Image (tube, rainbow, N blue to C red):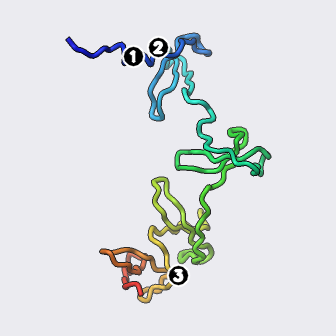
Amino acid sequence: MSKIDHHLFSVHAQAFEREPCPQCGAELLIRQGKHGPFLGCAAYPACDYIRSLTPSGRDIEKVLEGSACPDCGQPLAIKKGRYGLFVGCTQYPACQHIESLQESDDTQILCPDCGKGHLVSRTSRYGKQFYSCDGYPHCKYVVNDKPIPMPCPECGWGIMVEKKVRGNLRWICPQKKCGHQSEQV
């Protein structure tokens, strides 16, 4: 004796007109995946046809006027991807040109590990900022805190990092064996 009308909850499946699978002719059903709903063949796994329910140009946020792709000459657009916003060619997947939307923060601090590259600000896929050598993949030096171009007075390492400890800013040596700390002046 439930007062809930269950037909109201099953309406979305009947809202679109049924169409046959283009590969095998079986019915297409709405399936749920980790990236949202999609159309899939009822004869799965014998038939592996799938189709997205969202329009293909949905990832484009804004087409940039007056800027052309250096590879193919088509307009560039601001797109929304897995790791945030970026600039990409509107002719994707034919042209796969992409650019970063953020300007890189080059600290002009020499990498203390290799001595050739400079430390550059980057953002992880989780949104955290870190600093790494621009000589990657030859140099894989990474530091999580903001580097200061001052050698450690104890061990002589090329940089110190700025870290907030109990509300106070401190300069700390990033070498685990050293661990030298000093109050910021």
Task: Look at label 1 and name its amino acid.
Answer: Ser
Residue 10, numbered label: 1
Question: Of tags 2 and 3, which is closer to the observer?
Answer: 2
The crowd level at tag 3 (other Cα within 10 Å; few <14, some 14-19, many 20+) is some
The residues tagged by marks 1 and 2 sit, at their Cα atoms, a distance apart of: 7 Å
Q: Is residue 114 above or below residue 38?
A: below
Q: Is residue 27 above or below residue 54?
A: above
Q: Is residue 138 visible?
A: no
Q: Pointer 3: what residue? A: 149
Mark 3 lies on a secondary structure that is: loop
Marks 3, 1: nearer the viewer: 1
Task: Please give the name of the residue rendered at 62% of the width and 62% of the height, measured from the top-left corner.
Answer: 103
Give the mark count: 3
**Which disc is residue 14 wearing?**
2
Disc 2 to disc 3, C-alpha distance = 64 Å
Instruction: Say which quarter of the image contains residue 23.
Output: top right
Expressed as whole percent of the image width and height from the top left, the position of residue 96 reads 69, 45
Q: Position of residue 28 (x, y in %)?
A: 52, 16
- When asked about the image quadrant of residue 60, the answer is top right
- Structural distance between the alpha carbons of marks 3 and 1: 63 Å
Q: Do labels 1 and 2 touch, CB within 8 Å?
A: yes
Mark 2 or mark 3: whose residue is earlier in sequence: 2
Image coordinates of residue 69 in percent, x first then y, are: 75, 49
Determine whether 52 is above or below 70 in the image.
above
Quadrant (top left, top right, bottom left, bottom right) of the N terminus: top left
Would residue 101 appear left or right of 180 to someone viewing this image?
right
Give the numbered dot on residue 119: none
Q: Secondary structure at mark 2?
A: helix
